[in-house]
Structure formats: structure tokens, C-alpha cells
Amino acid sequence: MKKHDFLFSVSTNAFQIEGARSLHGRTDSLWDWYTKTYYKVPPVGSTEREINSIEVSSDFYHKYKSDIKIMKDLGLNAFVYNMDWTRIFPTNENYINPMGIQFYVNLFEELRNNNIKPIPILFHWDTPMWLEIKGGWESKEILKAFRNYCATVFKYLGKYTDIWFVNDENKSFTLDGYLGDTFPPCKNSPTSFVKAIHNLNMSGAIAKEEFLKAKELGYITESSILGIDDDWSPPVIWGDEKNDTLNNELLENYNSWMRDFWIDPNILGKYPSVFWDYIKEKNLDPNILEGELEYLSKYKLDFIGWNFYRPYFITNKNMIIDKTLLHKEPVNFDFGNFSVVLPKEHKNYTKWLWPIFPEYLEVGLKAYKDKYNLPIMIIENGFGDFDDKSKKLILDYDRINYLKPIIDIITKCREKELNLFGYSLWTYCDIFSPSAGYRKDYGLVSVDFNSPILERKPKLSYCWYKNVIKSNGKVTDFNKKELENELNELLDNWNIGWK
Ligand code: BGP
């Protein structure tokens, strides 16, 4: 990979920000089906799950030019964006929707014209419905369609960037969608789960083969890299584990399942032993065809993207737990010897009970370096909250207080040999949240979802992150009064949030 300046970026995702879900030839994907089918909007202020329409969401589809002006003002040099497969291939594996691919050409052109490097993610949970009805990720049909999709976007968009990702969080997508029913396609079947996982791993290798072909054809530069994204939450042992041996076994089992299982096939080219143990113990058939394991090993991915929000507190699955010590029931999985818990003794949580523990960012970066020793970029990190948008100044101090130690650790880790080459904050502006609809604000920029023009307005964290970027990560301290004056002045001259 060519030597880059450190990338200060933001990340977002088509089905959560773009809107225009039925425009210009696009057809439904899995998340359109899901949000229409399971539409539910709880009372205002409740953290209960909201499943709301994504028909318009933040209407990035029409507002991307003014949004990019805002990103440029923020000082970004990169923008992680998951493209919408269904917008480009709305009906079958061969028909390319001209307005679909044109949107991404326009978007990437606009980003480049503003010195912002697009970092595309090919798949972020949003399977085209015309494929889902054929079995989606459980069927080999999807692999041929995915190959065409990769070849097409590398051809038309390869000239705009040299950093690509195949996926975002295969773990969330498959655990919550195939081994749980909180996310679409809402299956709860170990067989569906292992079939989907294996085909997703195959899609990573297929993307790599098409990536190499695109290099030979000159669509992509020789130094370009293709990565896999992972959302491993580093483990924190909770409870009176008996001894180091048991602790180490527990950590080993957790990491094999919650990290290695999801990236070893595409990074090391082989499944960890827990995968084979699982399919044997449960008598499952992941439908691995002749030659597919060799194929995985032949077309490995180049680097890792890491979504870090929080560590997980874990304990041995068989441990007798005093539940009065926990905020919620322990979470168990269909596999592994561990349970995930939310201990009351830990004082720092978000309103959705995500543990706040920034130190585990460094623990995780060191663990990835020790095990894989590959370039790594933080692809998601952010703070979901109920922001008070009722006043002129949106003073999201809780978000800044979450992000400050994170950036300090990023800056410290850049000086160590941890191969860290970028940080992408989740997220640019308020968007649809898979677990909380429009009530969970993550944006540095607010979106007024009650205004017909979905007006954008910077929050205090926008000014803070702008100063971070300007100082190349060195300035994270801030004077409240000065920062609020900066925001006030920015708003008094604000005229790009609505065009
Ligand atoms: C990640 C997803 C993102 C984003 C983020 C926040 O898992 O990749 O799409 O949604 O989590 O999650 P949520 O909005 O559910 O809090």
C-alpha cells in the first residue's frame, strides 16, 4: 500500500443515509423489506427499538453535494461509504441500472474534487430482494451476482480510490440475521447461519479475484488494497474466575469465536478449529463445495478494518451469576463457553447500555497486530445518544467526552508500530440506526428530520473534530467557552446545510 497521510474520515452507509429507495430504477433490498414489514415507532424518549421507514432517511442521495461541502469544511481527507448494491443491480445479476452506477460516479467524482478519498464498502447487510428470494447468502446464486457487482464497480469506480472493503460486520449481519431474528432476513437457524457465513467468506475471495483482474485491466492501481471489516469487541473478564488457566481458556474461546471465526477465512485463508467443531457437534452442512477451501486460501484479503465501540464483559457460560449485579440478563450464543454481561459495577455506559471503556481500543489494536500484523484502519467508532436539538447550539459534550480519549489513544498508537493508518468516525450526520431508528443520534452534524429540507446543522462535536483533524490528532483538549463561540460563529455564517 502506498504511504498515506493518516486518514481522518467519517463512515456511513447507504441504507441508513441515502433515501431515494424507490427512485431512478432502484428496487427493494432486504432492509427496505424489513423496515416496511416490521415498522414500529415506540414513544418518544424510549430506548425501545424503533423500526422506521428508510424511504427518505437523510436524503443523502439528493444532498450529497452540500454534504460534501460540509465534509470539506470539516477537513476530512477520506469518507468510508457502503454503496447500495441494489441501486446498481436492481433486477438481476446482469442488468446495470445506468442511474444507479451514475450516482456513485457522481458521488466519487465530487469527493475527489474536494480532496476526499472515497473508501467504498461493497456489502453492508443490504442484500437485493431479487437475490434474497432466491435464498440470499444461503444460496450459491449470490456468488455469481456478487462477482458481476464487484467487476462492475471496480471498472467504473476503481480510478477514484486505492482503498476498498468487501464488507461491514459480517458478524452482526449473520449473528443477528441468521442465528437471531433481530435483523433481516430474521432467520434463527444454525444451518442458515453456517451456509451464509461460508458464502460471505467466498464473496471476500471472489472480490479479491475480481480486484486482481481489475488491476490487470488498469481499472485499479497496482498499489490498491482490499480489506475485510470486523466488529470484534475485546473481552473483559468479569466475575471471580478461578485461575489464570481458566481465564486464558475463556479468552481464547471468546476470541476464536468472536474474532477469528469472522476474519481468519479471508485473512489467513482457513477456518479456525471452532468452526469445524461447531458444524460437527451440531451436524451442520455449510455447503462447502469442492475447491472452495483452496479458493479461500488463494484469494486472501490485504488488511483489516475494525469497528470499535466497546469491549464486552464476559464470564464463563456455566458460572452461577447473581443477576442483581447486572443491568440485564446475560447474553448467550449458540456456541462458545462464554456469556456476555453488563455489570452494574462498571459505571460508564451509553443510554443504550454500551460500555464506555476506551482503553480497549489499544488492547484490540495490539491484539490484531500480534495475531495478523497487517495494516489496520478504524472503520467505525462513535457515540449514540439522544441529542438535545431544541436550541441553536447542540452541545453534545457526552459525545466529545466519549471521543476525546479515543483520539488520544489513536494518536498514541500511531506512534507505535501497530500498522494503524486511519480513523473513521461513525458518523457524519444523524441517520437511520438499525437498532434504534432515528432516535439514536450519532452525527457530528444534526439532521432535522421534521423539516422538509432535512436541514443539516453542525453540533459542538463537529467543531471539536475539526480542531482534532487540523492538529493531526494532537489537539483534543478544549475550552468550553471557546468551542461554543466557534460553533456560534459557524452557525451565524452557516449557509451550506440546506442546498
Ligand atoms: C454498526 C453498523 C452501523 C451502525 C453502528 C451503530 O454495527 O455497522 O451500520 O449502525 O453499528 O449501530 P446502531 O445504530 O445500531 O447503534
Image: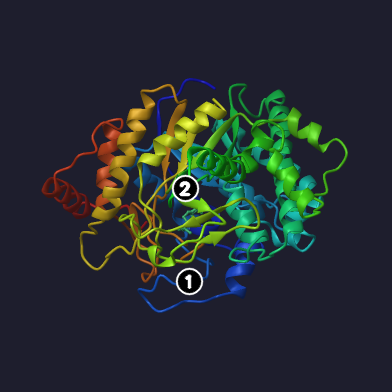
Q: CA distance from mark 1 to mark 2?
A: 37 Å
Residue bearing the label numbered 1: 50
Q: Position of residue 440 (x, y in %)?
A: 40, 63
Q: Position of residue 425 (x, y in %)?
A: 40, 44
Q: How is the image coloured?
A: rainbow
Residue 330 left/right relative to 100: left
* Element type where label 1 sits in the image: loop
User: Which residue lies at the image location 75% right of the left edge and 28% below the top edge?
Assistant: 298
Q: Amino acid at mark 1?
A: Glu
* Element type where label 2 sits in the image: loop
Relative vertical location of residue 118 with respect to residue 21 in this rendering, above or below: above
Quadrant housing residue 182: bottom right
Mark 1 or mark 2: whose residue is earlier in sequence: 1
User: Which residue lies at the image location 71% right of the left edge and 23% below the top edge?
Assistant: 216
Q: Residue furthest front?
A: 242
Q: Residue furthest bottom?
A: 43
Numbered label attached to residue 405:
none
Q: Amino acid at mark 2?
A: Glu
Tell me the crowding category of disc 1: few under 14, some 14 to 19, or many 20 or more residues within 10 angstroms, Cα based. many
User: Which residue lies at the image location 53% right of the left edge and 60% below the top edge?
Assistant: 331
Numbered label attached to residue 241:
2
Foreground mark, 1 or 2, reads 2
